[in-house]
Image (cartoon, rainbow, N blue to C red):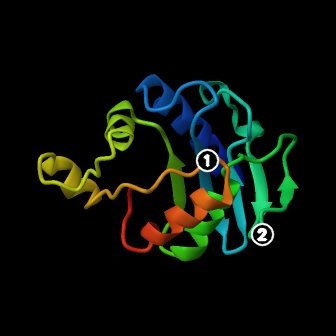
């Protein structure tokens, strides 16, 4: 997939996530692996439902900005860690679904078989200990789980 097509799809995905109430305002972020050492990410500080393809930011595998007029997401470290650890993953979507957020705030993992559809679609969904948004601690905590799970 070209960078242009990836950017177009990312903007569409952001709008769809917002329409479904899975992100709000500036919350959430996306990344797409373009090559081994290039990825496209959503920008920081922008309402995701209003993003255009031209707003996306290209970074290299170390997180250095290569193209784009905006700054990359503040969660860039988290995306880089996931994409480095999981070569089979082509994209990362960090959203805040209200139900999943409620479980997390209550300290409950989504790993019981009370939601069989979720288990079939995503597998076990563990609870990652809290880390401040954009912090190295959050990236480290996610990295501990992402090797064995597709959703957190």
**Which residue is at a point 65% across and 24% down the rendered structure image?**
50
Residue 56, numbered label: none
Q: Report whether 66 appears left or right of 49.
A: right
| Mark 1 element type | loop
Q: Where is residue 40 drawn, in percent x and y?
A: 69, 54
Depicted 152 relative to depicted 69: above or below: below
Can residue 30 be seen here? The reply is: yes
Q: Where is residue 7 drawn, in percent x and y?
A: 66, 45
Q: Report whether 116 appears left or right of 152.
A: left
Residue 62, numbered label: 2
For disc 1, the neighbor class at 10 Å (few under 14, some 14 to 19, many from 20) is few
Q: Where is residue 119 drawn, in percent x and y?
A: 20, 55
Q: Nearer the viewer, mark 1 or mark 2?
A: 1
* Snapshot quadrant of residue 47: top right
Circle 1/circle 2 CB separation < 8 Å: no
| Mark 2 element type | loop
For disc 2, the neighbor class at 10 Å (few under 14, some 14 to 19, many from 20) is few
- Residue picked out by circle 1: 132
Looking at the rendered image, the quarter that the N terminus falls into is: bottom right
The one nearer the camera, 96 or 3, is 96
Depicted 81 relative to depicted 107: above or below: below
The one nearer the camera, 106 or 72, is 106
Total numbered labels placed on residues in the image: 2
**Which residue is at a point 60% across and 74% down the rendered structure image?**
84
**Which residue is at a point 71% across and 47% down the rendered structure image?**
74
Can residue 1 be seen here? The reply is: no
The one nearer the camera, 141 or 36, is 141
**Which residue is at a point 70% across and 49% down the rendered structure image?**
4
Marks 1 and 2, how far apart at CA: 21 Å
Q: Earlier in the sequence, mark 1 or mark 2?
A: 2
* Snapshot quadrant of residue 121: bottom left
């Amino acid at each position: 997939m070209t960078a242009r097509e990836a950017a177009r799809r990312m903007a569409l995905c952001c709008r769809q996530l917002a329409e479904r109430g899975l992100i709000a305002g500036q919350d959430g972020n996306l990344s797409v692996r373009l090559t081994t050492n290039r990825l496209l990410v959503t920008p920081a500080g922008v309402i995701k439902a209003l993003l255009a393809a031209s707003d996306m930011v290209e970074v290299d595998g170390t997180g250095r900005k290569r193209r784009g007029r905006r700054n990359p997401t503040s969660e860039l470290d988290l995306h880089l860690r996931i994409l480095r650890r999981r070569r089979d993953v082509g994209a990362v979507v960090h959203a805040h679904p209200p139900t999943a957020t409620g479980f997390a705030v209550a300290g409950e993992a989504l790993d019981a078989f009370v939601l069989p559809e979720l288990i079939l679609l995503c597998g076990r969904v563990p609870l990652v200990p809290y880390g401040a948004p954009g912090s190295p601690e959050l990236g480290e905590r996610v990295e501990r789980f992402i090797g064995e799970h597709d959703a957190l």
